[in-house]
Image (cartoon, rainbow, N blue to C red):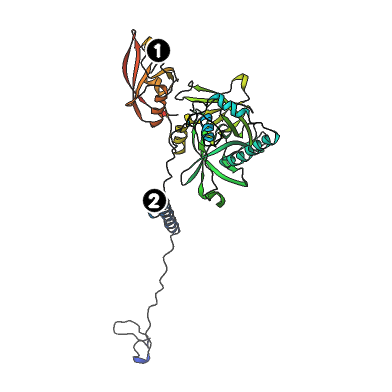
Amino acid sequence: MPENEYGKQEHPDAFNGSDSQSDFMIEKIKERPVNKKKLIRRTMITAAMAVIFGTIACVTFLIMEPLISNWLYPEEEPEQVSFPEDLEEMAPEDMLSENLSGNEGIDSGEGNAPLEQDQIQEILSGIVLDMDNYKQIYMALSSYVSELNHSMVTVTGVSSNVDWFNNVEVSRNQSPGVIIANNGKELLVLADYVPLKRAESLSLSFSYLEGVEISAEIKGVDTTTNLAVLSVNLADLPQEMLQPDGIVIASLGSSNLRNIVGTPVIALGSPMGSSGSMGYGMITASTLQNNQADANYKILQTDIYGSSSAGGVIFSLQGQVLGIITNQKNTADMKNIVTAYGITELKKTIEKLSNGEKIAYLGISGIDVTDEANEEMGVPYGAFVIDVDMNSPSMEAGIQQGDVITAFDGYSVHSYNDYITALMQAEAGSGVELTVMRAAQGTYKEMNIRVTLTQR
């Protein structure tokens, strides 16, 4: 191989003109090795960020969706439930006089004057009832009960238990209820809470709708009377109940009538201990119960012999609710006589429970100051405190037995009932100022006491 001038060997074809091919250096580029740890770390970071951002998006949607929906489609608030003031019913003799005053041939005295007792007896003595009359009376009562039952429901509470052998036992307790209101969104029912205390789920059934059960929820409970208001969404009711004549709301009457003793009544619900039972009778006694804190209930006693576990409602023959049956107030010698809380004293409590409001609690039992006590002993008129609940707001504020409450947060208190009325208008958790008269050295001295109410 020839050498060049520098002593280097040359290939003979190195410079061979256009006919020779040039040799080029061929490079092989190696790929960088994959860092598996780094790749896994980046993948995990990406996945974690996706989970975090997804979670934030979900939470934001859950929070904002109801707000946006309410803004775009505002939901109507339920109407406030309220019950009208009591109206005194016409006395039976006045009703008879009015019915007979327009009849020819019957002399009821001058003008439209009420009939005297002897005149009434004379008219009634001329009426002779036979067996057909009694049949008609009882058939009429039966038909009337069927109408009233459209206002009654049966509340069923379902609870479960596990026995020693790990078997699940399901128990069903029932409580009669009465339809009391429709607030535009819900149907409200008043029922005895005792059989439903341990229930895990609640449902309503109607006597005139076979096989229909509607899910219900507790709206409020009064621990003093053990009464509860339950709610049912109107959207869950069958279409036939949404018709104008479908839902029948019971009319709440008055238990403060002067002549309520002797009033004929019908007991519906479970007065005999079984659902759907009923009883006829009359009110035989009316007594005021004030031995419970912050309560002033009237107890109506009937001559209906029922069950010691009776429940339900007492209706008048005018179709009005006069009382809610309770078995907590029966005496030992009359434990099977049907008794009831007077409806008038319950109305404010039912209103609060129906509107989802808390009932304020102060914790005193009291009575009215009589005229004799005021004149002879100088006791000022007001709510006389006969007992104070242990650990109650009243005890913590220093109210004592023998004190007389004469004002409640600016409202004058002349009786224990005035105190109850003012307390029912107050809100649980609020602070109120009481004016209290306390006996000291033969006279009564005025004190102002600040109290924070709690929930009953």
Find the distance from the CA under tag 1 to the CA under tag 2: 60 Å
State whether residue 265 is above or below residue 394: below
| Residue, far top | 441
Report the disc number at residue 373: 1
Please identify the quarter of the rendering in which residue 437 is found. top left
| Residue, far left | 5
Q: What element does badge 2 sit on?
A: helix
- Judging depth in this view, the residue of 410 and 392 nearest the camera is 410
Q: Viewed as shown, does residue 358 lie left or right of 96?
A: left
Residue 15: % across, % down: 34, 88
Residue name at image x 39 percent, y 53 percent: 68
Labels 1 & 2 near each other (Cβ < 8 A)? no
Q: Amino acid at mark 2?
A: Leu
Is residue 32 something one can see in this rendering? yes
Please identify the quarter of the rendering in which residue 264 is found. top right
Residue 286: % across, % down: 53, 23
Q: Amino acid at mark 1?
A: Ala
Is residue 328 something one can see in this rendering? no
Q: Which residue is mark 2?
A: 67
Q: Quadrant of the C terminus?
A: top left
Please identify the quarter of the rendering in which residue 406 is found. top left
Residue 315: % across, % down: 56, 34
Residue name at image x 45 percent, y 57 percent: 40
Q: Which of pointers 1 and 2 indicates the residue nearer the eye?
A: 1
| Residue, far right | 131
Mark 2 Cα-neighbour bin, 10 Å: few <14, some 14–19, many ≥20: few
Residue 48: % across, % down: 43, 53
Q: What element does badge 1 sit on?
A: helix
Q: Viewed as shown, does residue 297 lie left or right of 15?
A: right
- Judging depth in this view, the residue of 394 and 284 nearest the camera is 284
Q: Earlier in the sequence, mark 1 or mark 2?
A: 2
State whether residue 66 is above or below residue 416: below
